């Protein structure tokens, strides 16, 4: 039997699936976690996302479309958690300030702060699982001329509604999921046009006539943009940076902190979960993600079984060899 406690800095669960009007910092002065925006739909079919112990048909009581709105997915996730009464384990409005480890006792010490009262608490634990996600701290590049651009510049993390850009000409920088979806939403809700600036290669879709893909931005001069190869496009009202996110874990002691970019096998994690330098620490959901819900579940089960002794870890050499093989596959 496990004594489980979950620290959650928000006042409710739902994580990224919660939609908020807030950007920057929230009412407690903490960075806004969610990058969610209005009119978002899943970009993956529900058949690749659903939990084996709680299907979409069970949840809805009838067959449902493969691609779901944000509200439907959030409701599905929370309904499954409610089915198992998981809220009893969660301390809401609790900000984790630092996590340290004492090798002499094999005990973690966690310092938390109440987001409402600022009261500080210290607790001790045998194992720590970090499941904060990594899509809340934006990666923000800069370009020549940004400081004098008279329009609005924002990261996709702060994008909330395409209707804010009705009638405007928007430059979208990036060439992955967010760039694709936001560019299409801009046109759908009345933007005058969109230019997508890619770093390595165009997405190459059959875009509406009002969307154009061009190479990477090199400079802004006023409202006009220049791209690699000398291409020019004039008259932008806004720039949206769809440039990804950084793993940001400032509450973890340096020797416990995962340092990685967005990849399928983060370095230093055995089976993508166990922190090699301290196997009592596990990271969930830190990979570049495709089949998200099912991957999170599998990682959670793996962590549970290790803690309960149902599975045993290889020795240090065995873990290193396994991680090496995965890195060879990644680089192949």
Image: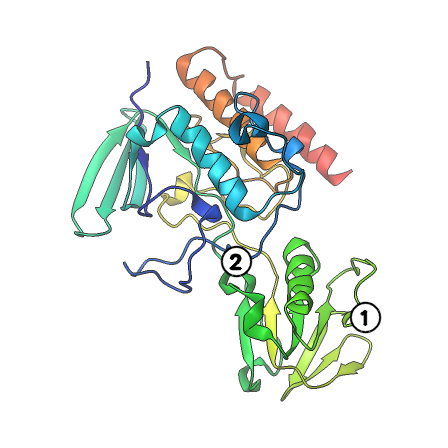
Q: Residue 330: name its quadrant.
A: top right
Query: Is residue 157 in view from this perspective?
Result: yes
Q: Which residue is mark 1?
A: 209
Q: Nearer the viewer, residue 283 or 323?
A: 283
Which of the numbered marks, if any, corresponds to residue 37?
Answer: 2
Q: Return the x and y of residue 135 as percentages of the image width and height.
A: 52, 50
Callout 1 secondary element: loop
Query: Is disc 1 surrounded by few (<14), some (14 to 19) or many (20+) residues within 10 Å?
Result: few
Q: Residue 44: name its quadrant.
A: top right
Q: Residue pushed farthest bottom?
A: 222
Q: Earlier in the sequence, mark 1 or mark 2?
A: 2
Q: Nearer the viewer, residue 276 or 219?
A: 219
What residue is drawn where x is 61% and y is 83%?
A: 145
What residue is drawn where x is 54% and y is 47%?
A: 70
Q: Nearer the viewer, residue 145 or 254?
A: 145
Q: Is residue 288 left or right of residue 253?
A: right
Callout 2 secondary element: loop
The residues tagged by marks 1 and 2 sit, at their Cα atoms, a distance apart of: 24 Å
Q: Return the x and y of residue 272 as percentages of the image width and height.
A: 56, 31
Q: Return the x and y of residue 67 as percentages of the image width and height.
A: 65, 42
Q: Nearer the viewer, residue 175 or 62?
A: 62
Q: Residue 231: name its quadrant.
A: bottom right
Query: Is disc 2 surrounded by few (<14), some (14 to 19) or many (20+) residues within 10 Å?
Result: many
Query: Is residue 271 in view from this perspective?
Result: no
Q: Is residue 161 left or right of residue 321?
A: left
Asked if residue 73 is positioned above or below residue 247 in the image, the reply reads: above
Q: Return the x and y of residue 104 as percentages of the image width and height.
A: 28, 26
């Amino acid at each position: 039997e496990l004594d489980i406690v979950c620290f959650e800095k928000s006042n409710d669960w739902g994580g990224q699936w919660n939609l908020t009007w807030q950007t920057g910092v929230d009412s407690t002065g903490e960075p806004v976690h969610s990058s969610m925006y209005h009119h978002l739909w899943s970009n993956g079919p529900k058949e690749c996302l659903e939990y084996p112990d709680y299907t979409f048909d069970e949840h809805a009581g009838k067959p449902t479309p493969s691609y779901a709105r944000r509200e439907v997915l959030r409701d599905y996730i929370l309904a499954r958690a409610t089915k198992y009464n998981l809220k009893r384990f969660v301390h809401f409005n609790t900000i984790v300030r630092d996590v340290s480890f004492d090798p002499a006792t094999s005990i973690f010490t966690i310092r938390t702060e109440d987001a409402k009262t600022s009261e500080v608490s210290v607790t001790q634990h045998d194992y720590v699982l970090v499941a904060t996600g990594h899509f809340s701290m934006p990666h923000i590049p800069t370009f020549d001329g940004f400081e004098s651009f008279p329009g609005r510049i924002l990261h996709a993390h702060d994008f909330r509604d395409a209707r804010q850009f009705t009638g405007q000409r928007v430059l979208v920088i990036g060439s992955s999921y967010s760039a694709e979806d936001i560019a299409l939403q801009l046109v759908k809700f009345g933007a005058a046009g969109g230019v997508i600036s890619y770093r390595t290669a165009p997405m190459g879709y059959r875009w509406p006539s009002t969307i154009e893909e061009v190479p990477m931005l090199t400079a802004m001069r006023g409202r006009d943009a220049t791209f690699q190869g000398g291409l020019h496009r004039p008259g932008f009202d806004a720039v949206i940076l769809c440039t990804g996110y950084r793993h940001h874990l400032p509450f973890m002691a340096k020797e416990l902190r995962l340092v990685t970019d967005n990849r399928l096998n983060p370095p230093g994690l055995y089976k993508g979960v166990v922190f090699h330098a301290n196997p009592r620490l596990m990271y969930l959901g830190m990979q570049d993600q495709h089949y998200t819900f099912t991957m999170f579940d599998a990682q959670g089960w793996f962590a549970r079984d290790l803690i309960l002794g149902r599975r045993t870890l290889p020795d240090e050499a065995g873990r290193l060899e396994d991680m090496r093989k995965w890195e060879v596959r990644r680089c192949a």
